[in-house]
Image: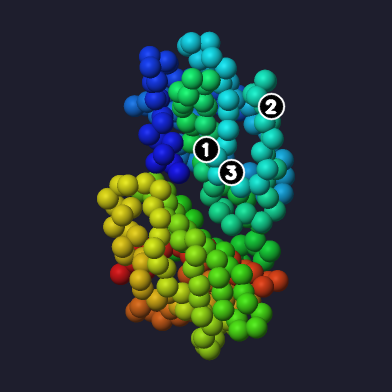
Amino acid sequence: MITLFTLLLGCNLGGNTPPKFQSFNGEEVKYLFGFAYVPSSVFEPEVVNSNTRWNISVDVSDANGDDVTISFPSAPGQIEFNQDNKTGYWDIPIDVVDYYPTLQVLAVDEQGASDILIYPLEIFQQWDTGLWDTGDWRDDWGFEGPHLIGNFRVNETNGTIEGSVQFLGPEQRCKLTWNEVTGTREEPCELCENSWQVILREGSPETSQQSCLDTITQLQSQTWRLGWAESVQWEGLNYQSPLLYDHPTAGWVPFGQATFQQQRFSFQMDLDNDALN
């Protein structure tokens, strides 16, 4: 979808100048190599809350004086937008599978010329159990580093899971998505109350950097053994609601945070270099 819109970006049809974004939600839109962006969102996505209404305002100009229509392709939930005053709102769904949705704002004039603004967002997640009850997590496991985010439904009958997994690498500006991931239940590990085997297949990168493509090769087609427990004692520390991971050399260890309730299993796994080997 993004590739298609990129082809349309700045498209000049028969001498017609495409529209240009001037501002988004009151912040000036900048251009770099023809790509529109909002400076505050380059390194930190805007954090919004699920099950809330998020207001949207767009200022766009057209050198030819054409009317410009604004649309939001692939946005989850309902967006209401007034084309006359270029304001509206997004009712963010209560259950958003993608915690890091990218809002696409498409401007098309009446002659078909177009421009697109990519605006990254983060859906705030309130973990039911809070953060770990110890401050002794290793710094290189922090949420600023690369991590996997999983969101699964649990089959009540056989315990299998089905959902999606994303890899987010802030330093690489890399985002990979596996939309159809299944896992089979296995006997719980010594630390686990529940555990599963998951294999990632046919992920989709949003960027074409070589480092991002290398990462998808590293993560795919290997078995990920994941588990969860309400509370774990490990190496003298107490972890509340951790994600447990069967590390190739260390065995089952707390490797992130997870929730398991009402037949939903969600996690954030913090990856260091060892986890990719």
N-terminal label among 1 and 3:
3
* 1 and 3 marks in contact (CB < 8 Å): yes
Crowd rating for badge 1 (residues with CA inside 10 Å; few <14, some 14–19, many 20+):
some
Location of residue 110 in the rendering, given as x and y in whole percent from the top left corner: 53, 20
The residue singled out by tag 1 in the image is: 104
In this rendering, is residue 152 above or below 126? below
Location of residue 228 in the rendering, given as x and y in whole percent from the top left corner: 57, 76
The residue singled out by tag 2 in the image is: 82
Quick one: quadrant of the C terminus? Answer: bottom left
Residue type at the position of mark 2: Asn
Residue type at the position of mark 3: Ala
SS under mark 2: strand
The residue singled out by tag 3 in the image is: 75
N-terminal label among 3 and 2:
3
Question: What residue lies at 27% left-to-right and 50% top-to-bottom?
Answer: 210
Which of the labelled discs sits on residue 3, or is there none? none
* 3 and 2 marks in contact (CB < 8 Å): no
Location of residue 19 in the rendering, given as x and y in whole percent from the top left corner: 48, 20
Q: Give the image's coloring scheme.
A: rainbow
Give whichever of 146, 213 is nearer the camera. Answer: 213
Question: What residue lies at 52% left-to-right and 63% top-to-bottom?
Answer: 164
Give whichever of 131, 83 is nearer the camera. Answer: 83
Q: How many marks?
A: 3
User: How far separated are the C-alphas under marks 2 and 1?
Assistant: 17 Å
Which image quarter: residue 153?
Answer: bottom right
Give whichever of 191, 172 is nearer the camera. Answer: 172
In this rendering, is residue 223 above or below 99? below
